[in-house]
Image (spheres, rainbow, N blue to C red):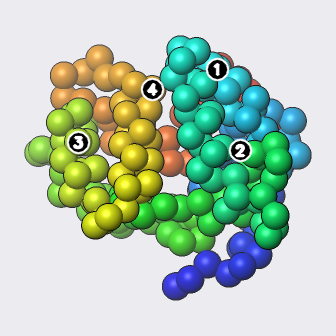
Amino acid sequence: MVAPVDGPSPAPGIGFAPGKKNTDLQSHVAFFDRDCDGIIWPSDTYMGFRDLQFNIIFSILSMLFIHGGFSYVTWGRILPDPFFRLKIKYMHRGKHGSDSEVYTTLGEFDNDRFNYMFDMYSSEPHTHLKFNEGVRMVHGNMNPYDFFGWFAATLEWLATYILLWPQDPMGMKKEDVKAVYNGSIFYKISGRKVKL
């Protein structure tokens, strides 16, 4: 199924409000929308990464990559945004190749695909994902000649591993990885209240 041009729902603005039509991908990025206007400025992304306890260098590099790579496709206009902002409403357009395919083309979370991914790449009892298993997963999902997708998937999983930095030798917990997909763990780690 191909995503419709205008997307499945409006910008969330309030994040995790029950009964709203936010996709999981929109909820994932809504954490970074500090003023709840449906637009993410580069400074919002930088501050969001800092709130998640990433260092200054990683936060700057992530901001540059995310906004440089996704601003045009999520802005929703023919002309690019001169400020490299992202629109949450069109975030599904930023879904790239060589990813885990856990988000659908509309930005919805595919629980069956998530479980399949964990069963395929994690060791028994499939409740945790170690760093080397995550590397195998990223490598296994690589599409031919998709250099942008390779880099994006690698950066995303590196950031996820650093964010969840497991104390358990078994690796990252399955529930925590799932919470990254809908963004709920961002509020827990940052100590910021969920937007209401």
Q: Is residue 4 above or below residue 190?
A: below
Task: Give how far apart the Cα atoms at labels 3 and 1 are.
Answer: 26 Å
Local crowd size for mark 3, using a 10 Å CA cut-off: few (<14), some (14–19), many (≥20): some
Name the kind of residue labelled 3 in the image.
Val
Q: Secondary structure at mark 3?
A: helix
Q: Secondary structure at mark 4?
A: helix
Name the kind of residue labelled 2 in the image.
Ala
Name the kind of residue labelled 4 in the image.
Leu
Q: What is the quadrant of residue 116 in the picture? A: bottom left
- Image disc number at residue 163: 4
Q: Nearer the viewer, mark 3 or mark 2?
A: 3
Q: Quadrant of the C terminus?
A: top right
Please name the residue that numbered disc 2 is placed on: 30
- Image disc number at residue 135: 3
Q: Is residue 20 visible?
A: no
Q: What is the quadrant of residue 83 in the picture? A: top right
Local crowd size for mark 4, using a 10 Å CA cut-off: few (<14), some (14–19), many (≥20): some
Residue at 37% x, 62% y is: 146
Q: Is residue 153 visible?
A: yes
Q: Earlier in the sequence, mark 3 or mark 2?
A: 2
Q: Earlier in the sequence, mark 1 or mark 2?
A: 2
- Image disc number at residue 51: 1
Task: Give how far apart the Cα atoms at labels 3 and 2 are.
Answer: 27 Å
